[in-house]
Image: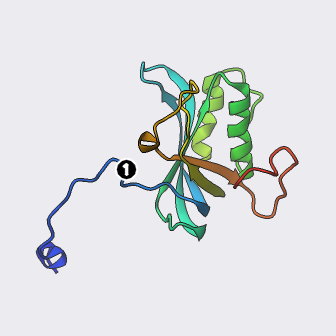
Amino acid sequence: MSIRDLLGDFKPTTNAEDSFDPLKGKYEVVIDKLEVGKNKDGVFDRYKMTLKVTKTISGDKGDNRLFFKTYMKDNAEKVKDLICDLFTMGVNLNTAVDTDEDFEAQFSFAVGAKGHVSAYHFKPEKDMQGNVIPEGDRKPVQISKVYKPGEKADKATADLPF
């Protein structure tokens, strides 16, 4: 079958900025990438994990979609979140290393690890400075959490919506 036979009279259209909806549901994922990321000024100041959906467990169909998680390198709580997310997915990083480079050298071992993500989204009413965002300008924000099936949340996280 030729591409012409496959597509028929198809005419391409422009993808709108808001045509890509965030996901809500539970998903099986695999770590696609774990890398050091940089900000708009070119400073490597964050860790970035890309999770690829391999199976939709419940909710919006998300097969082959990606979740992006960012953890700021200079924020101890965010780095702890990264380590816990990886541990939850069966990756145990050595944290008794002396340099960022030694820590980051372990990232390649995480690629391919399997896990689960719970996701939801919302449209914030205020920006980061507390200013009200006009209703027509509100864009959805994707939230995701790595979890282990069957584990119970502690009281500090039990009331989270995912």
Q: Is residue 109 above or below residue 72?
A: below
Instruction: Say if residue 114 shows up in the picture.
Output: no
Q: Which residue position is annotated with label 1? A: 18
> Can you give x and y, in whole percent of width and height, for residue 91 in the image?
70, 48
* Residue at the limit of the structure toward the right, as seen here: 155
Q: Quadrant of residue 73?
A: top right
Q: What secondary structure is marked by label 1?
A: loop
Residue 11 as seen in the image, left or right of residue 71:
left
Q: Quadrant of the C terminus?
A: bottom right
Q: Nearer the viewer, residue 7 or 105?
A: 7
Count of labels shown?
1
Residue depicted at x 56% and y 34% = 126
Disc 1: CA contacts within 10 A as few (<14), some (14-19) or many (>=20):
few
Residue depicted at x 63% and y 37% = 106
Q: Quadrant of the N terminus?
A: bottom left
Q: Nearer the viewer, residue 1 or 138?
A: 138
Residue 103 as seen in the image, left or right of residue 92:
left
> Can you give x and y, in whole percent of width and height, for residue 82 in the image?
67, 39
Q: How is the image coloured?
A: rainbow
Residue depicted at x 43% and y 20% = 42
Instruction: Say if residue 133 shows up in the picture.
Output: yes
Q: Is residue 141 above or below residue 112?
A: above
Residue 70 as seen in the image, left or right of residue 14:
right
Q: Amino acid at mark 1?
A: Asp
> Can you give x and y, in whole percent of width and height, for residue 85 in the image?
70, 45
Q: Nearer the viewer, residue 124 or 37?
A: 124
Residue depicted at x 56% and y 24% = 129
Q: Nearer the viewer, residue 153 or 52?
A: 153
> Can you give x and y, in whole percent of width and height, for residue 29 in the image?
58, 59
